[in-house]
Amino acid sequence: MMPPHRFPHVLRFASAHRSFVALCLLAWLMAGAAQAAIRIADDRQQTVELPRPAARIVSLQPSLTETVCALGACDRLVGVDRHSNWPESVRQLPQVGSLADAHVERIVALRPDLVLVRPRNRVVERLESLGIKVLALDAKTHADMRRNMEAVAHAIGKPGAGEALWHRTDVRLDEARARVPAAWQGRRVYFELHGGSAAASEASFIGETLTRLGLRNVVPGSLGAFPKLGPEYAVRAEPDLLITNEGRGTPPIAARPGWGTMAAVQRGRFCRIAESHFDVMVRPGPRINEAAQEILDCLASVDRRPPPQ
């Protein structure tokens, strides 16, 4: 056997090969460490740490279900609440109750690596005690919606995708504003919720959408995002337009105490949005531009009505 020093090129090759292998190993370890460092601050002021991008997600909030799908990760959903109904594909997923009555056993059986939920949900502590990661997110404003989109994007391993989704949504809101008739700019609106027991104020995401369209909300933000108000509030406010929904148990416009005396009612300046369309208007999710279009359709329908005799 010849001594190694007679073949220096062999030694150089072996040394280079060892260096290459070491670099590959280091890169692999660094990639693994980076993947393990998914940390997201939620609305409980807690940091949720995921060992890897969430691949099996249960959503207990329709707007968060829609956000997951809008980010191209609908295939990662393994269960949803009973109210999640968009896109159509989520209707086929196992349902695990709702905010008030989530079925913990069903959730655990789905083996999720992440559950999306609103804060102050009583199921949170129980799920976490079982070792299930919970990301609690809420949205009352457009800024909250933007933040939530990016939080979900981080959770699925797509940082930046949430910001991109919000940008597209924001552009569409600007496009909707450009289509609002000039005669409606600055007109005052009352947006009713929960069958007449509450309203959306200017501090809510619904109120912000109205403002983006150039309309004015008659309910001030000082009352809270969604204050409980009686029918007499709208009578005193005398809005130019009333927006309500046609849900079961929701009384007709003229049946509300005192509403028949309002000029808006007498002139036909009101819209009762079908329940199937009202969902998109009251969800702080990626379809907020569709909510803006519903409002535009409302304005157009009012403008087409014949004047009162």
Image (spheres, grey):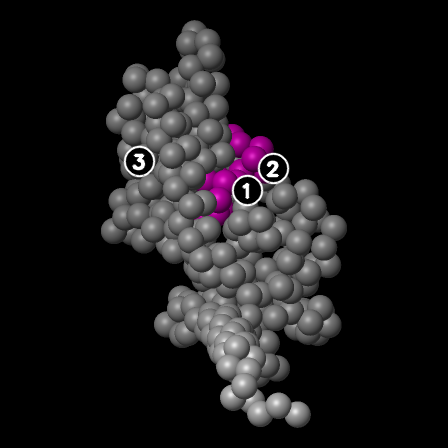
> How many other residues sit within 10 Å of disc 3, few (<14), some (14-19) or many (≥20)?
some
Q: Residue at x 58, y 65 (%)?
A: 54
- Looking at the image, residue 246 lies above or below residue 159: above
Query: Residue 101 in the image: x percent, y percent?
Result: 62, 66
- Tell whether 285 sits left or right of 219: right
The residue singled out by tag 1 in the image is 279
Query: Are the two marked residues, 3 and 2, in contact with CB atoms closer than 8 angstroms?
Result: no
**Residue 215 figure quarter:** top left
Q: Residue at x 49, y 57 (%)?
A: 158
Query: Are the two marked residues, 2 and 1, in contact with CB atoms closer than 8 angstroms?
Result: yes
Query: Are the two marked residues, 3 and 1, in contact with CB atoms closer than 8 angstroms?
Result: no
- Tell whether 241 sits left or right of 305: left
The magenta region covers: 272-288
| Mark 1 residue element | helix
- Looking at the image, residue 36 lies above or below residue 248: below
Query: Residue 20 in the image: x percent, y percent?
Result: 52, 74
Q: Amino acid at mark 3?
A: Thr
108 and 51: which one is in front?
51
Q: If the image is split into quadrants, where does the C terminus sit?
A: top left
Answer whether residue 286 is magenta in the image: yes
| Mark 3 residue element | helix
Q: Residue at x 44, y 51 (%)?
A: 162
Q: Earlier in the sequence, mark 3 or mark 2?
A: 3
- Tell whether 222 sits left or right of 162: left
Q: Amino acid at mark 1?
A: Asp
Q: Amino acid at mark 2?
A: Ser
Q: If the image is split into quadrants, where does the N terminus sit?
A: bottom right
Task: Compute the Cα span from label 2 to label 1.
Answer: 6 Å
The residue singled out by tag 3 in the image is 211
Answer whether residue 140 is magenta in the image: no
